[in-house]
Image (tube, rainbow, N blue to C red):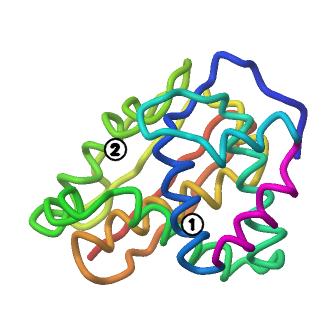
Amino acid sequence: MTADPPSEHEVRGAWFVAARDEVIARFGQDGLEVLVSAMPAKHQSILREATGNAWYPEVALQTCLHSLRLQLAGGHEVRFGELLESCTERGTGRFFATLLGLSSPRFVLKNVPKMWKSIRRGPGFVTVEPDGPTAMMLHYQCFPFFADPIYEELTVHSVRALVRLCTGTDPLVSIERSTGDSVDLRVDYG
């Protein structure tokens, strides 16, 4: 993990709620306790008590992601990716998942900037542009948490899960460029 980025970055509690529910479903209450105990004391109550609409420091999510990767996925990249995708799918809820299933990947990807703003507060933002008939480029910018590679993994797997809910198949998601505060993601769903 890197040093704490600016505190003006916040994330909506829905992510913590989805992660907590997914961990309990997969690993039971004992798994949740392993995850929580591996987090810094100042963030432990956030994972235990988060509510979906409250805002929490982004750094708390960062510590949660590292604990998920190390403690519950055993540092294994594929298992961690599967866990992130399951958390994303759980976080969308049944109603939203049904809507995604009725939408095109292009429509869903074009709305990623709105989704970003609904779950994050701070100076970061996303823009989207077509890249051929069955691909889109997503440009995440001004988000210093990308200095931590775990956020690239989160971004790739979250987008993969969203598109899979539309198409029923896994899109090809690749990082085309990455800096300490930005990521350009290519999503090919054709």
Which residue extends farthest left? 102
Whichever of labels 2 and 1 marks the residue nearer the N terminus, that label is 1
Bounds of the magenta span? 28-40
Residue 161 placed where, x, y %? 41, 68
User: What is the secondary structure assignment of the residue under circle 1?
Assistant: helix
Kindly report the secondary structure that dominates the magenta region of the rendered protein.
Answer: helix
Picture quarter containing residue 9? Answer: top right
Q: Any magenta on residue 73? A: no
Image: 88 above or below 57 = below
Residue at image coords 36%, 69% = 188
Instruction: Name the residue that disc number 1 marks.
Output: 84
Image: 180 above or below 99 = above
| Amino acid carrying mark 2 in the image | Val
Q: Nearer the viewer, residue 4 or 87?
A: 87
User: What is the secondary structure assignment of the residue under circle 2?
Assistant: helix
Residue at image coords 43%, 40% = 52
